[in-house]
Image (cartoon, rainbow, N blue to C red):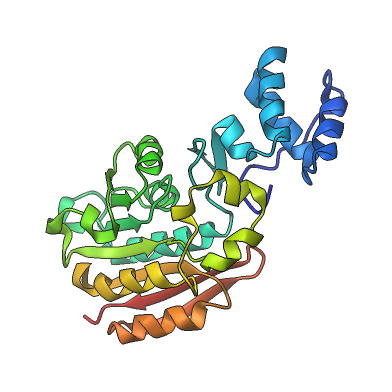
C-alpha cells in the first residue's frame, strides 16, 4: 500500500472467493494482498458485482484508498476521493505533535469557554487529516484548514464538518482576522523534489495531484514560503510545524531560524519514517 494509511485488517480466507481474490491481487503486484482483500470485501458489502468493479480498479493500479473511498489514519476513518493526495502513516507524527501543542496552549483547567479554545490551522491540508486528528484529540479546538486543490478541499469539508475549510494559495486562503491569533500552524506542504517525482510509485505519480507532491527543485520551495509568512499569523508563543524528510530537515530548520522562529527542533519517528520540524514565535 505504498506507505499509505489504509487499515491493515486481517483477511478471512474461509470467505467465499477470498483466496482467489488474494491471489489475483498478489499477481497484480499488491504487496499487502491479504490486507487489501479484506478491505475490498468490506467495501463490496456482499455484492459480487461491486467487488469485481473495485478489484478491476485496484488491479489497474489505482490506489486502494481511492478505490474504497476512505483511509484509516491513527484509528480515524477519513474520506478520500480519486485524484486527491492520500494521507500517509508518517503524518500521524505531525498530527500528534500539533494536538499536543494545541492542548498545551489551553490555560490549565479550562475546556470549553471561547477564550481558552486553541486556534489551529492545517495548511496544505489535503483531505484535512491533520485537522481532523487534532479535532478528535483536542475537544473545543478551533480548526481552520486550507488547500490550493479544490478537489481536496471538497473532501476535507467532509472530514472536518465543524472546521473552517477554504481553498486558495497558502495564507491567501485564510481569513485575515486570524493574523496574530494562531496557536498551532501545521503544514504538510509538498516536499518531493521535482526530479524525484518520476521515481515515485505509480500509485502516487499517476493518481495523486502533482500539486500535492511537487516541492520544487530541492523540495522546499513551498515550505520556505510558508515559513517566511508564518510569524505574522502565529500568536505570541505560537508554534509552526512542518512535515519534511530526514534529509531535508536541516534545510527546513534553517528556514525556521531565518524567519525569526526560536526553539527550533526536529522530531523523528523511525518506525513511521516521519520527520517534523517545529519552531516557536517568540512571546
Front position in the image: 144 or 55? 55
Q: Is residue 61 visible?
A: yes
Front position in the image: 69 or 77? 69
Residue furthest to the left: 177
Q: Is residue 47 visible?
A: no
Q: Is residue 46 above or below residue 248?
A: above
Q: Which of the 4 quarters of the picture holds residue 228?
A: bottom left
Front position in the image: 250 or 116? 250
Q: Position of residue 210 (x, y in %)?
A: 48, 53
Q: Is residue 274 left or right of residue 173?
A: right
Q: Position of residue 59 (x, y in %)?
A: 73, 34
Q: Which of the 4 quarters of the picture holds residue 103?
A: bottom left
Q: Is residue 94 left or right of residue 232?
A: right
Q: Which of the 4 quarters of the picture holds residue 98?
A: bottom left
Q: Is residue 13 left or right of residue 111?
A: right
Q: Position of residue 27 (x, y in %)?
A: 85, 38
What residue is drawn where x is 73% and y is 31%?
Answer: 38
Amino acid at each position: 500500500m505504498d506507505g499509505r494509511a489504509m487499515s491493515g485488517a486481517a483477511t478471512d480466507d474461509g470467505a467465499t472467493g477470498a483466496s482467489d481474490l488474494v491471489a489475483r491481487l498478489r499477481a497484480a503486484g499488491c504487496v499487502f494482498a491479504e490486507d487489501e482483500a479484506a478491505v475490498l470485501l468490506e467495501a463490496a458489502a456482499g455484492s459480487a458485482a461491486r467487488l469485481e468493479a473495485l478489484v478491476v480498479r485496484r488491479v489497474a493500479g489505482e490506489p486502494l484508498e481511492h478505490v474504497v473511498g476512505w483511509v484509516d489514519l491513527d484509528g480515524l476513518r477519513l474520506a478520500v476521493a480519486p485524484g486527491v493526495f492520500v494521507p500517509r502513516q508518517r503524518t500521524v507524527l505531525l498530527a500528534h505533535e500539533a494536538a499536543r501543542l494545541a492542548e498545551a496552549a489551553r490555560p490549565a483547567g479550562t475546556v470549553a469557554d471561547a477564550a481558552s479554545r486553541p486556534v489551529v490551522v492545517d495548511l496544505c491540508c489535503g483531505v484535512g487529516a491533520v485537522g481532523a486528528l487534532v479535532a478528535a484529540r483536542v475537544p473545543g479546538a478551533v480548526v481552520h484548514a486550507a488547500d490550493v486543490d479544490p478537489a481536496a478541499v471538497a473532501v476535507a469539508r467532509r472530514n472536518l464538518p465543524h472546521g473552517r475549510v477554504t481553498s486558495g494559495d497558502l495564507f491567501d486562503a485564510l481569513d485575515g482576522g486570524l493574523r496574530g491569533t494562531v496557536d498551532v500552524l501545521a503544514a504538510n506542504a509538498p516536499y518531493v523534489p521535482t526530479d524525484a517525482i518520476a521515481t515515485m510509485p505509480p500509485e502516487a505519480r499517476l493518481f495523486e495531484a502533482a500539486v500535492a507532491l511537487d516541492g520544487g527543485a530541492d523540495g522546499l520551495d513551498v515550505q520556505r514560503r510558508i515559513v517566511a509568512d508564518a510569524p505574522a499569523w502565529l500568536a505570541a508563543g505560537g508554534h509552526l510545524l512542518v512535515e519534511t524528510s530526514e534529509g531535508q530537515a536541516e534545510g527546513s530548520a534553517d528556514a525556521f531560524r531565518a524567519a525569526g522562529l526560536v526553539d527550533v527542533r526536529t522530531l523523528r519517528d523511525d518506525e513511521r519514517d516521519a520527520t517534523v520540524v517545529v519552531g516557536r514565535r517568540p512571546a
